[in-house]
Amino acid sequence: MERLAILGALHEEIADLLAAMDPGAAVHRIAMRDFHVGTLWGTPCVIALSRIGKVAAAATATIVIREFQVSRVIFTGLAGGLHADVDVGDVVVASTLMQHDMDARPLFDQHEIPLLGRVHFEADAVLSQQLYDSAARFTSRRDMPVIQAGATFAKPRVHHGLIATGDVFVSHNDDAQALRKRLPDALCVEMEGAAMAQICYEFGIPFAVMRVISDRADHAAKTDFTAFLQNVARVYTAGILEPLLKSGAWSDG
């Protein structure tokens, strides 16, 4: 039996998924975390709150792989937009991830993960494309709310590309600009994805990361992030994952 792991850093990001699990899901308490094991929209799943940051995400990913023998991992949640083409309310599905705060120079090149000889971790192409397609269908629905981004209003769009991860909540214009200059291809910034990706790479487990843009990683980030967390994140996550899990396509490839 193939089992999918779905992880999120904050409760609101996975709340609707937990509510939708079939009755009788078991809860396993390991390393101060609750792992909900059961069926979600016909798919055997383990859903867990990783908590915030790279170490927390890596620990949670290790547990779901070792203790629950999952065959694939999806990480979902919010992120700050970096690229000029990415607006608040958009969805970013990772093609690859990297740790923007890894710097072991002069022993290794900037951003290189020591002793692995790599900067980037590639998401599973099939699972990522399935997430992208489901997100595109979800955001194109006629009843999809229009998001205000600055002074403009626009329907959400879906992007596929580089996600940058680091142990810092980017909420200052100068910090965001520095990241844009150093990593011009990065679509968004968050705090867990590339750490989870490293663990999945080391264990040989396919993975995907999906993020909803809650802010522009600037001075308004805290306010925008909180509002999105409470009102939007859970709707996006459930709305995108439900048809994918019901179809059974996630286990293909």
Image (tube, helix red, strand yellow):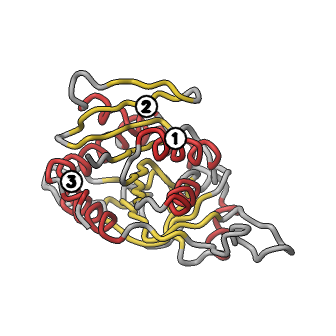
**Location of residue 248 in the rendering, given as x and y in whole percent from the top left corner:** 17, 53
Badge 1: how crowded within 10 Å, few (<14), some, or many (20+)?
some
**Location of residue 29 in the rendering, given as x and y in whole percent from the top left corner:** 49, 24
Circle 3: residue type: Leu
Circle 2 SS class: strand
- Whether tag 3 and tag 1 are in contact, CB under 8 A, the answer is no
Report whether 191 appears left or right of 26: right
**Location of residue 44 in the rendering, given as x and y in whole percent from the top left corner:** 26, 41
Q: Indicate which label's residue lies in the foreground, 3 or 1.
A: 1
| Pointer 1 residue | 63
Occupied quadrant, residue 132: bottom left
Q: Is residue 94 above or below residue 65?
A: below
Badge 2: how crowded within 10 Å, few (<14), some, or many (20+)?
many
**Location of residue 34 in the rendering, given as x and y in whole percent from the top left corner:** 47, 27
Instruction: Please tell me the numbered disc located at residue 35.
Output: 2
Circle 2: residue type: Phe
Specify which label sits upstream in the sequence, 2 or 3.
Answer: 2
- Residue sitting farthest toward the top: 24
Spatial CA distance of label 2 from label 3 is 21 Å
Circle 1 SS class: helix
Spatial CA distance of label 3 from label 1 is 24 Å
Q: Is residue 215 above or below residue 46?
A: below
Question: Is 190 in front, or is 198?
Answer: 198
Question: Is 184 in front, or is 154?
Answer: 184
Report whether 186 appears left or right of 152: right
- Residue sitting farthest toward the right: 106
**Residue at 66% of width from left, 65% of height from top?**
100
Residue 32 can be seen in this image = yes
Circle 3 SS class: helix
| Pointer 3 residue | 244
